[in-house]
């Protein structure tokens, strides 16, 4: 099939590469001309494990192309996938739909023959109706269907998730559109659940899923606080909970709160939609409030660890919102860094992938190290804020010789408390 993808971010680019790898002719469209030039030159513009290899392969084999021209990308496409951003509105926190609407207005002009227009961006319920009316208004003669095709790609694991989906959800209101999508995802037939529902149900599934996972994270963080006061160990508690198949063991790792490009904005958008529909969603609202407090609590733990030290130097390990990605959007680590800076902290940070993006957010307010041991040199405390595998191999002997004071605040429970203490470190993890 000929596929056009509008948007080349953390959803659009992995999706485009994945569909090209399945044998489709894919054109990715982006208004950012500089970005398109980089992509056309064979340079991947974001980090995802395994993405670059497939990116280069499919460009070389002619299945993956890039353009800033909507006409070039959309003309004669069988499927047009909208994968632009829906950031939270600065005031209401609802999903900002300006990029979706702009894409719909422009693509409408170039539809050629029957086309399925798929909204992959996370969008409010009813967006499919709006997109359909925008296209119809701008091109009354167009032959098309609008469907909802929500993405369930985890940042850091997007390539793996594309080829190993736990489910594919399609919100289509016509059989013709369903048949096209069945053909597109035929390689996954019999390998995963492909669920066809109505468009509004599909739009709701994405929000409902992300809000539930955010609540689960908030819950385990509250349980970690309880364990710290009661004498229980959250790791043992989470292990026991996870053995219950009704609960499962995923998203039961306590930490500094949820972040990234999805959970924060999707919970806020879900809360806004609920309010607009006169529904009181107390669990989601509690998770939003509690998650904001969580990051401040973690920052205070770091500050408390050096409260008796004059002009303390803080080493921060991890800036991305999670391992496996360079994305710093709504990163708990970055919010903790901001809170530390408000207290005039002297910070040296290291992240294996995200320092370029972090620098765009905080500039030279902090110092950047080339590796974790350069970061901890002369430090009074190490704060581990992102769960990179590299940090699990933290060499206590090497760090001990470099640091001024041997303090560790492990907000991800990556390190072994006993090993830390045996090497003379004052160690504070989460939930014990």
Image (tube, rainbow, N blue to C red):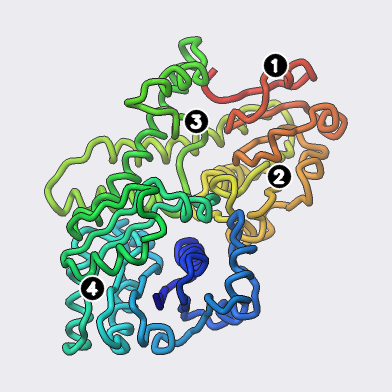
| Residue 222, x across and y down, in percent | 41, 26
| Residue under the image location 49 percent in, 19 percent down | 234
Which residue is the site of mark 1? 418
Q: Earlier along the polypeptide chain: callout 4 or callout 3?
A: 4
Taking the image as shown, residue 67 lies to the left or right of residue 120, namely right
Which residue is the site of mark 2? 346
Taking the image as shown, residue 402 lies to the left or right of residue 295, namely right
Which residue is the site of mark 4? 131
Q: Earlier along the polypeptide chain: callout 2 or callout 4?
A: 4
Gap in angstroms between the C-alphas marked 4 and 3: 38 Å
60 in relation to 217, above or below? below
239 in relation to 99, above or below? above
| 139, 223: nearer the viewer | 139
Q: In which quarter of the image is residue 84?
A: bottom left
Marks 2, 1: nearer the viewer: 1
Q: Earlier along the polypeptide chain: callout 2 or callout 1?
A: 2
| 366, 133: nearer the viewer | 133
| 369, 107: nearer the viewer | 107
Which residue is the site of mark 3? 253
Q: Residues within 10 Å of mark 2 (few under 14, many from 20)?
A: some
Marks 3, 2: nearer the viewer: 3
Gap in angstroms between the C-alphas marked 2 and 1: 28 Å
| Residue 46, x across and y down, in percent | 59, 63
| Residue under the image location 39 percent in, 48 percent down | 191
Q: In which quarter of the image is residue 101?
A: bottom left
């Amino acid at each position: 099939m000929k596929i056009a993808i509008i948007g080349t971010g953390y959803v659009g680019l992995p999706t485009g590469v994945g569909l090209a790898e399945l044998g489709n002719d894919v054109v990715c469209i982006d208004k950012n001309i500089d970005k398109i030039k980089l992509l056309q030159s064979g340079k991947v513009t974001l980090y995802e494990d395994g993405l670059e290899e497939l990116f280069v392969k499919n460009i070389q084999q002619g299945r993956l192309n890039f353009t800033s021209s909507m006409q070039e990308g959309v003309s004669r496409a069988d499927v047009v996938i909208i994968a632009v951003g829906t950031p939270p509105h600065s005031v209401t926190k609802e999903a900002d739909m300006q990029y979706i609407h702009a894409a719909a207005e422009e693509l409408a002009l170039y539809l050629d023959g029957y086309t399925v227009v798929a909204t992959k961006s996370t969008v409010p319920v009813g967006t499919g109706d709006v997109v359909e009316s925008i296209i119809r208004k701008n091109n009354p003669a167009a032959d098309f269907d609008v469907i909802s095709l929500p993405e369930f790609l985890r940042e850091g694991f997007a390539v793996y998730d594309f080829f190993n989906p736990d489910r594919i959800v399609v919100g289509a209101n016509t059989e013709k559109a369903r048949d096209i999508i069945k053909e597109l995802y035929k390689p996954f037939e019999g390998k995963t659940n492909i669920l066809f529902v109505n468009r509004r149900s599909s739009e709701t599934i994405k929000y409902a899923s992300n809000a539930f996972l955010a609540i689960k994270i908030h819950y385990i963080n509250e349980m970690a606080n309880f364990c710290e006061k009661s004498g229980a160990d959250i790791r043992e508690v989470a292990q026991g909970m996870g053995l219950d198949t009704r609960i499962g063991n995923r998203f039961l790792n306590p930490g500094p709160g949820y972040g990234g490009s999805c959970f924060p904005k999707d919970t806020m958008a879900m809360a806004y939609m609920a309010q607009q529909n006169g529904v009181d969603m107390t669990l989601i609202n509690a998770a939003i409030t509690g998650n904001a407090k969580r990051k401040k609590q973690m920052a205070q733990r770091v500050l408390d660890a050096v409260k008796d030290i004059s002009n303390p130097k803080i080493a921060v390990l991890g800036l991305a919102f999670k391992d496996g990605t360079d994305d710093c959007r709504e990163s708990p680590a970055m919010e903790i860094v901001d809170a530390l800076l408000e207290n005039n902290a002297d910070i040296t940070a290291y992240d294996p992938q995200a320092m370029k993006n972090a620098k765009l957010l905080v500039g030279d307010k902090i110092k950047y190290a080339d590796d974790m041991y350069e970061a901890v040199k002369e430090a009074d405390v190490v704060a581990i804020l992102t769960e990179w595998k590299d940090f699990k191999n933290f060499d206590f002997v090497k760090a001990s010789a470099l640091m001024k004071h041997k303090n560790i605040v492990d907000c991800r429970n990556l390190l072994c408390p006993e090993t830390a203490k045996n090497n003379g470190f004052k160690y504070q993890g989460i939930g014990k």
